[in-house]
Amino acid sequence: MNDVKAPLAQATYIGCTTEELAARRKGDKIAGGVDQRVLFPRRGAVVLYEDRLLLQGWDDQADLVLRQAEVTSVDNEFTELYRRFLGGLLNSGKPLILGTATVGEIYLMVDHKTFMETTDNRRWATLLKTWLSSTG
């Protein structure tokens, strides 16, 4: 019998670290107003399991695997680095921001739709907060 548990949720993401976002130049941010992928060089699948959050394709060497104890915060809000101008006027453009003990703070856009500039970040913030509050 197969002992592997099915994912609780999965989607695609584009993302970056806070440091990467802070290093973007004004021209990058203007271009990001048209296409968010300019600001978020990391991309792949995000998969939530009972015991871990997996960001496939996080870097060239490996996927990023985060256990509950390694995720220190979950937010879905505009910040000084990522303002409403970049994310669009809709609340669905707010970034999903994870504080982590392993790679610092990361910004994600889950199921980002370029034309409409919408994401599934609000739903994922709720999923991740529920996951963190569970005993796993």
Image (cartoon, rainbow, N blue to C red):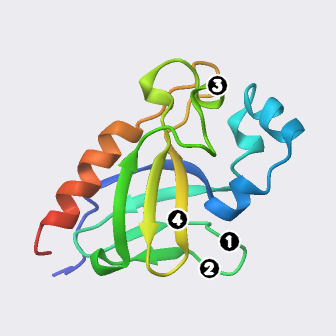
Residue 11 point in image, percent of width and height: 44, 48
Q: Indicate which disc residue 85 carries.
A: 3
Dot 3 lies on which element?
helix
Which one is earlier in the sequence, the residue at label 4 or at label 1? 1
Query: Can residue 41 be seen by looking at this rendering?
Result: no
Residue placed under numbered mark 1 in the picture? 59
**Amino acid type, mark 1:** Asp
Label 1 close to label 2 by CB (< 8 Å): yes
Residue 118 falls left or right of residue 132: right
Query: Can residue 85 be seen by looking at this rendering?
Result: yes
Q: Which of 74 and 34 is in front in this view?
A: 74
Residue 36 falls left or right of residue 78: right
Quarter of the figure that contains the C terminus = bottom left
Per the model, the C-alpha gap separating discs 2 and 4 is 18 Å
Q: Indicate which disc residue 62 carries.
A: 2
Per the model, the C-alpha gap separating discs 1 and 2 is 6 Å
Per the model, the C-alpha gap separating discs 4 and 1 is 15 Å
Q: Indicate which disc residue 105 carries.
A: 4
Which one is earlier in the sequence, the residue at label 2 or at label 4? 2
Would you place residue 17 above or below residue 102 in this image? above
